[in-house]
Amino acid sequence: MQSTAAVPMSASVITTGGSGARSGAARRPGRIRVCWLRGEALACPSLRISQEPARRAVARAAAASNGAVAGSGGFDYDLVIIGAGVGGHGAALHAVEEGLKTAIIEGDVVGGTCVNRGCVPSKALLAVSGRMRELHDEHHMKSLGLQVSSPGYDRQAVADHANNLASKIRSNLTNSMNALGVDILTGVGTIVGKQKVRYGKVGFPDKEITARNIIIATGSVPFVPKGIEIDGKTVFTSDHALKLESVPDWIAIVGSGYIGLEFSDVYTALGSEVTFVEALDQLMPGFDPEIAKLAQRVLINPRKIDYHTGVFASKITPAKDGKPVLIELIDAKTKEHKETLEVDAALIATGRAPFTKGLGLENINVVTQRGFVPVDERMQVMDADGNVVPDLYCIGDANGKLMLAHAASAQGISVVEQISGRDHVLNHLSIPAACFTHPEISMVGLTEPQAREKADKEGFEINVVKTSFKANTKALAENGADGLAKLIYRRDTGEILGVHILGLHAADLIHEASNAIALGTCVQDIKFAVHAHPTLSEVLDELFKSAKLQPRGVQDSKPNQPPQPLLKVLSFITSLFSSQK
Amino acid sequence: MAASPAPFSLSASTVAARLRAAVAPAAAARGRQRRGRMVVRARIREIFMPALSSTMTEGKIVSWTAAEGDRVSKGDAVVVVESDKADMDVETFHDGIVAAVLVPAGESAPVGAPIALLAESEEEVSLAVAKAQELAKGGQPQQAPPPSADAAGTPPPPPPPAAEAPVAAPAPLAAGTKGIATPQAKKLAKQHRVDITKVTGTGPYGRITPADVEAAAGIQPKPKVSPAAAAPPPASAPAVAAVPQAAVLPPVPGATVVPFTTMQAAVSKNMMESLAVPAFRVGYPIVTDKLDDLYEKVKPKGVTMTVLLAKAAAMALAQHPVVNASCRDGKSFTYNSNINIAVAVAIDGGLITPVLQDADKLDIYLLSQNWKDLVKKARAKQLQPNEYSSGTFTLSNLGMFGVDRFDAILPPGQGAIMAVGASKLTVVADKDGFFSVKSKMLVNVTADHRIVYGADLAAFLQTFAKIIEDPEGLTL
């Protein structure tokens, strides 16, 4: 699901610097979004789903069921959702299930960024890149006993695959809503007052409807920093890149977050060389440092990729007049000119900016923060005075809490739960994220430094255990033993704080961990769950089984260090294996 | 895997060679005092950046586990190095005191570059520190190591033919931005040690492409593996060390310069060392009809001609231990307790000498099995040091290529090497003067005349010929 649409503001964005005030702890601009939202989620005392019925919600429940029966109690709809992306879709489906009369307003195409210009088409391209990568890996093929002669690809056919996939998913989405009786209203929605939405052509919203509840789910667009000129041909964003109109010989990717990393996987598999431009001092700044380091070894160093870190792309000029694309790099700290790159193309993957203009928020006294709609932990929109705007919610990229498609959907479902009379607070720490490189990277919860900080602050101890894909039968059978899984948990209670995986099918493996976090399952319980053998899921099984809790009653003042010598051995074995390639 | 067999071990070689090299330009004036290196040799060692993987060109020091002034013993981890693949603890090969850290934690150094100095005792620490400062000044030591007064009277040894900068001296890291190079071009340049600033770009906008770098490195687009002649073997050289070379000739205009790989550097080093050994050669014709018959018989059982020859040589050596001996210090014979036959094998981009150990004791079937394993490992570059450096006698066979005779260069640490030519039908007159046509091959043995004399070699060859000409004993 997630990926391209998903990225929190990534590093190379000069202008995000100003938002540092939002997060006291995080000084580095690229991490602000993540830190901030995680910080907030942490502040919520219970990490579990709160089922406690709020008084207000009870009252609302009565009204809602009333409405559903009696034509929404004077309103046109029980729920109007502005934006038919993955978030809006998830909310709509759940609303119907709850018996709410629901409409969804879409000014562009159903499916939003994820389906049309994000996760979905990028997965098609990555499916191709994964196979190309395998076919071109002679060592890999030989060791499997396969013989393949000079595999190639047809760019247009690859592009068509991505495009076809997007339209297929789009029509699936549309059909599912139609079938359930969700009214799909075409146009751009604007909030004109309390529980009142107007929609229609841009600038001429001519139809007005009333709704008991409104959800803003307008998503985001690629963020393009100042000084960068987009021509859609040689300098472009993920929107253009996913159409795969060309495969440049050499492409610079500005930003090394999920989007950049996934595209580097695609482009290098298709034969391009890639240069990363990253504003922070290291690549993949949002990842757990250990995973980032391994990712660099597996996904960057052996490939036709180089990188410049600690630099901003201050000016990018598209190729014209017989000149290549010019990228001026300045030092991220001193702002001094460092170098000018000459490449064939540049992909701007510096994160995403909320798409909240024209929503009419001024009509209800709501001021966006850098474009994001301010919300509380229940996704209720806050006005300029910090008060909750009744009956108005905002989910997904537009609120910026966690810019992932499935997070938007989860937030939407959470909102529908609330308006159906059941209080619900989504635990963002249980929302997994994945990067679909080859091999994949996935994570849920806190990174190790975040967990250590939390542990220091709250006075508990954490343990970190790791396991390698090299110990997994299925991974070895697939010849895909590059990988690491890492579990961070509380030493006293066994609560899972974070899990990070780099390896074959990591994106599919993470859910055992994210479900455990969501349901509050601790390591000492989940370790008895049985996994089919031989499967990759045994990587997590191994991880859970290797977790040791503090013996009861023993107060050990010194936190257990991860078993370094074992790791050394593992990494040595890793090097032996991988160096034979 | 790396050509260097123990990729995580740290190579510490003596500092002398490198310093000598560095001093050389100013050598003439100071020549008399430079005998000092003989003394220094054993006392201050350099710790080099090890090659932790075959693709590693430089390593980053993650941390020093031993600090300056720490006493370390052989096998202790002294430094954690981050390569392109992993972080690894690196051990020292020698006891000593870490006198000076040349590359602090967080910095990188090319593979083979010195990263610290190890002094053997307290007294040498200050000396090593001084040396470290000299090295830091860019390899321009002001003077040679001083504690050599004891040797003042003797005439200075002739300086080495010439000196060259340490092979692994800090490579200029693509400093210039003039020639735009693609990411892969830069990677290849590093890997093949090509100075990218000297490469002419032919890509779009005149940029340097990977193909340009490969051309500069002399790599063909599709390198064909040519089973080149197996000349004499390389020996150990676990890691890149400074390779003393002949005088550096001026570059030929238009020619491409391809630096040696680690293995090739090791070969070169060993070849140069052989120049210090007074070698001589003795040839011997041997009729091989019976050997050929035997070969046909045992071939189905997996026995190769190489193994038969090795076995024959081993049996002959058992009777002539002096040919299996070596001269290590110029003053004595070192008789080896085992007969280990090293056999030169050409492999992609070099050659190596897997060793058939105890070839006199094992039967040909067992030897054949061992040989098969060794060759497989050699091709996969997985031979362990004791599997290619424990030879006491070397066999090099070019007969399969139709070569009728050649002579081999003596590998260091061995007394003799046998070069075997092809077996050819030849008209032979027997002692009664009757002509007949026989298969005959020429073998040519190169030996160290300090320990093996002409008569020794002749006697050995006679025994060897007898075994070959009446080969039934080989199968026992």
Image (spheres, grey):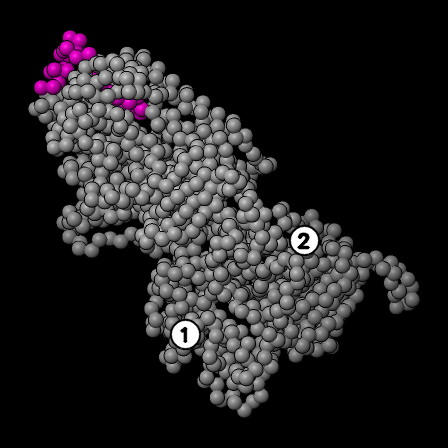
Q: Quadrant of the N terminus of chain A?
A: top left
Identify which residue is drawn at 26% across, 20% down.
A189
Position of residue B413 measured from the top left corner of the image (x, y, whole percent): 59, 71
Is residue A69 a member of the stretch shown in magenta?
Answer: yes
Range shown magenta: A59-88
Can residue B163 be seen?
Answer: yes
Chain-order first, disc 1 or disc 2: 1
Query: Which of the two residues, A277 or A460, is positioned nearer the viewer here?
Result: A277
**Furthest residue to the front?**
A321
**Furthest residue to the bottom?**
B153
The secondary structure making up most of the magenta span is: helix
Q: Which mark is residue B227?
A: 2
Classify residue B401 as left or right of residue B145.
Answer: right
Above or below residue A179? Residue A234 is: below
Position of residue A22 measured from the top left corner of the image (x, y, whole percent): 20, 42
Amino acid at the residue labelled 2: Pro
Q: Residues within 10 Å of mark 2 (few under 14, many from 20)?
A: few
> Residue A125's quadrant in the figure?
top left
Is residue A78 a member of the stretch shown in magenta?
Answer: yes
Amino acid at the residue labelled 1: Gln
Using the image, name the chain to which the residue with label 2 belongs. Answer: B
Can residue A546 be seen?
Answer: no
Above or below residue B127? Residue A498 is: above
Identify which residue is drawn at 33% across, 51% down.
A335
Residue marked by disc 1: B133
Position of residue B305 measured from the top left corner of the image (x, y, whole percent): 70, 56
Dot 2: element: loop
